[in-house]
Every structure is written in C-alpha cells, then in structure tokens.
Amino acid sequence: MEVLGERTLFVFSYRAGYFEKKALKPRCIKCKLILLFVRKMFMAAHVLTEFLREIQNFKGKIFSKKDHLQEFSDVENVLFSVAPATVEEIQKIVNFSRARGLGLVPVSSEPPHMRDGTAPEGQCIVLDLRGFKRIVQISRRHRVVVVEPGVTFEMLVPALKAEGLRPLMPLLPRGGKSVLAAALDREPVTLPRYQWDSADPLRCVEVVFGNGEVFRTGEACGEYSLEWVAQGKHLPLFPLGPHQVDYHRLVQGAQGGMGIVTWGTLAVALLPEVEEFYFVESDNLSQLAAFANRLIKLELADYTAVLNRSCLASALSKKDFLQSAPDKYFLLFSLSGLQRRPQQRLAYVKNEVASLSRQWGLELKSETSYLSSDELEHLFTGTSPGRFWKGGLGTHFREVFFLTTASKVDEMVDVFVRESTETGFSKGQLGVYVQHVFQATSMEIQFVLFHEDDEKEQVDKWERVLVDKLLEKGAFFSRPYFSWRRKVLRQNPVYFDVLMKIKRVFDPAGILNPGKLGEV
C-alpha cells in the first residue's frame, strides 16, 4: 500500500484481533498523522468485521460514523460504539473485548459528558447503554424504584411524581443524566435527611464483571430475574451481601472500572403534600453550614444546599444576579408537611425554624427582588435542559470536589481563595458549593473556577497546586477525576496495591474503562 511515497504493509493478525504495521519511518509530521489515521481506520474495520462474525444474531445497534462518536473527548481512540439490546449481548461484548485486550467504556448518560469518566484511554469500544430505558418497578410502600441505566432524571422525576414520590437527586441535574450513573458516582443528593449510608440511594444492582459473569448484589442475588421484579414477584431491597461482602460498593465510585451495571434499585422519598422554600444569607460560611446541620439533625429541613453568589448565579443562569444580589453565601432549604396533618406540621416547622434563625442572627426569607421561591424550587426539584448548571454563566469552568467535616470548612475555603488569587484569578471567578451528606455527618465541598478559554494553562496549574494543598489539609477525594485521579489513588501505595488486586479479580484483562482507577 502506497501512502505519500511511503511503502506501508499492513499485516492483519487474527490472534488478538489487531493488525501489525510494518513501514518505513515517515519523514514529516503530516505523513505520520495520515499513517495513524489509516491504521486506525483499518483496525476499526477489522475489529468490526470480527465482531459481526463472532456475535451472530446481534439485535442491538452499531455506530461507526465519526459524527455519532464525536461526543467523546478522545474520539480518535474509539473504534466504534455498540448499543446492545440484552444483558446476554453485553456479556458477549465483554468476552469479545477481553479476548482481544480492547478497552470497553460504558456510557449511559446523554451528551455532553462533563467529566472524563467516559474519556477513552487507548483503543476501545464504547458500550452504549442508553437504550436500556425501562423504569421496571416503582414501590411507594417500600419507597424504592428499580431502573435500567438509560433512565434519565427527566424521565424519572415525572414518573415518581405520579406515584407520590420524589428521587434523591443532585442539585439541578442535567435532564439527560442517567439516574443510575449519578448514584453509582455517589453524586451528593440534596435530601441528606433521607441519606442513611454513604451508598444511598443505591441499594441492589445487577452487574456484568470483566470476566463476563453476571452477578447480583444484596437481596437481588440468586436466580431472581428482572422480569420477576417487573411482575412484582420479587423486589430487591436489602443491599448488603451476599454473605459478609457488600459487593455493590465495589462498582460504586469505580467509574465503570469494576463492572457494568445493567439495573439497580434506588431509594426514593415521599412527595410532601405541602412544601415551601426559604433561604438565609450570611458572610460567614461556617455559620450557615452549622445552621444547616442543625436543621437536618432536628429533621426540620428537607432539601438543603449552600452556595456562594457566583455558583448561585450560574445555577440560575442569571448573570445580572452577580450585580443585584449581595456578595454572600446562601443557604437554600425547604420545609414540608407529609400525608398526616401536612398544614399543621408545616406551621410548627416554620415557627421552629424562624425561632432558630433569630437565635443565630439570620433573617429567614422566601423571596426577594433577586431570588424567587419558584427559582429555589426549580433548583431542587427540576432538571437542567442539556447543559450542566455550572456552565450557566456561559463561561468555561473547572471543578475540584471532596468530602470533609464542618470543622474544616473555613480552612478549606481559605486555601481555595488564597491559591486562586495567587494564580491570578479574581474573587468573582470563584464558586463554592457545600452539600451536607449522610444525615449531615459530613459534607461535600465543590470549588468551581469560572474562566475563559485562553486561561487553560493557568487553570491547569491552579488545579495541580490546589489539589496538593487540599490533600495536605486532609481533604478526602472520594470521587477522583481529571489530573488528580492518579495523584489521589496512588498516594497510599498499600491501598492502591489492594485496589489493583481487587480489579484483577473482577476484571482480569483490565478492559473495563482502562485508567479510571489510576492503573495506567
């Protein structure tokens, strides 16, 4: 084969599903790029041919056009995308990839993909699970819902509302965000009073491990099929086990690096009969965090979230909010009454919260010229169409998030502000979002830097330095992403060694979303 005067011989090797390229070294960068493109094109065509030959009667869909794969940040590494129709086909795809050493990247949310959890590392096949869209079972009695990975928040919220229920969901999630993916990633929910465990709202799951075997966790273990669940013959509730191992914790937080979840049981909450939304504001973040802690511990507030002015303006998609609202922190929360005497319950809760607010020197507000009650309600109960709420100001953003305790809030924010200003960013570019989790026993802090496109190098430096400083202060990065993934996961060699041993047990060939556990 002749390419720009270079003799290139492509020898296909059917042993591993690859081809070997033997060529004279090209003399220019353009020649190298063309050779790489041709090599990738031949490899994708060859692997796809083998896939179709090996997996016969495939009922799903295969996408190889570049415009379909463009949603992935490193499209050049994607050979093709495959959307299976059944769990059995997922098993066959896993075995196919394992036999050839090809990476397999599971995807269940609609684009855009805001973090690098779906960014391919090395040649891979994308496993598109967005076709699994069944809401299998909703149980008001047990306050759970069974969903497949393609079910999104814009699908689930109205379905639950019709049954008098509401999901435990993050702050203003994207409408196309997979509900199961959010739970697997341990996204902080805005209803911490109903979050009893670090795994909540996730209960039981069915997972296909990297060796191709199907496994069900907790009360779902055994021969129970999803059709049994759909017919109401069995409802998997209890998440622990089988035996003494909580297997659902292996796949949670692994970003698809331990197994592919095909359905899961999620905890939900009752929809109140009446609900009102309020906020208080203060210059003192630790005061608001402590006040929110008090409201949650006394079971007075339902939804809670603390944001600074920049983050709140972005969530509301209101640039003028930066000029009209005071430069303070805002604690947003709701008060409600459930089925039994809702108005009476709401009245005494409002009275109690008003009394507490006065004791803490805070003014309870439901609406002002710059923030309405309807806007507050939408932040907690609505979804964002398409974009992530942190992009509401129309600028680029970079985020760093971690778990900590109430006693360290001010210290962490001081580090964030100091490192950001020293790097050359203004205070108006800095966003802070604090979300209490696990019955307010701890909190996730999300630092957001709003920046322009030409500041990327400056932002990269800021991110590296900030993560190092936060680690020194005791920040716990339970959901590591981006450039700090390997730094966080490898900081304890013993922990990392155990993590890799566990991955080799459940993913012997290391094909499931390579690199997301810091192994590359």
Image (tube, rainbow, N blue to C red):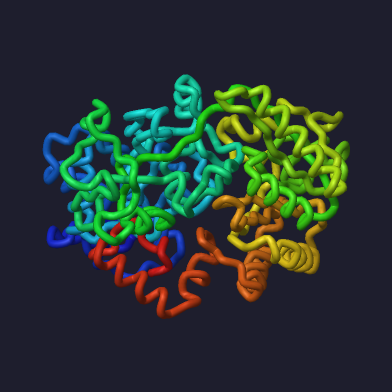
In the visual, does 497 lie left or right of 289?
Answer: left
Q: Residue 508, how many percent across, how many down?
A: 23, 65
Relative to the observer, which residue lies in front, 91 or 55? 91
Question: 28 or 107: which is nearer to us?
Answer: 107
Whether residue 499 is visible here, answered yes or no, is yes
Q: Quadrant of the C terminus?
A: bottom left
Q: Quadrant of residue 407?
A: bottom right
Q: Locate residue 499 relative to residue 335 in the image: left or right.
A: left
The single residue placed furthest to the top in the displayed view is 162
In the rendered image, the vertical position of residue 403 relative to residue 261, given as above or below: below
Q: Quadrant of the N terminus?
A: bottom left
The answer to which of 501 and 72 lies nearer the viewer is 501
Horizontal and vertical percent position of residue 205 = 32, 45
Residue shown at the point (58%, 27%) measured from the top left: 338
Q: Does residue 449 appear to the left or right of 173 in the view shown?
A: right
Of residue 63 and residue 116, the one placed in the foreground of this image is 116
Residue in the image at 51% along x and 70% along y: 488
Question: In this rendering, is residue 83 above or below 139?
Answer: below
Q: Is residue 4 visible?
A: no
Residue visible at 63% across and 42% down? 299
Q: Is residue 229 left or right of residue 440?
A: left
Q: Is residue 69 above or below residue 1?
A: above
Residue 136 position by quadrant: top left
Find residue 148 and report its image quarter. top left
Q: Position of residue 295 (x, y in %)?
A: 69, 45
Q: Estimate the x, y position of residue 93 in percent, counting from the top left.
A: 21, 47
Q: Residue at x 77, y 63 (%)?
A: 417
Q: How many marks?
A: 0
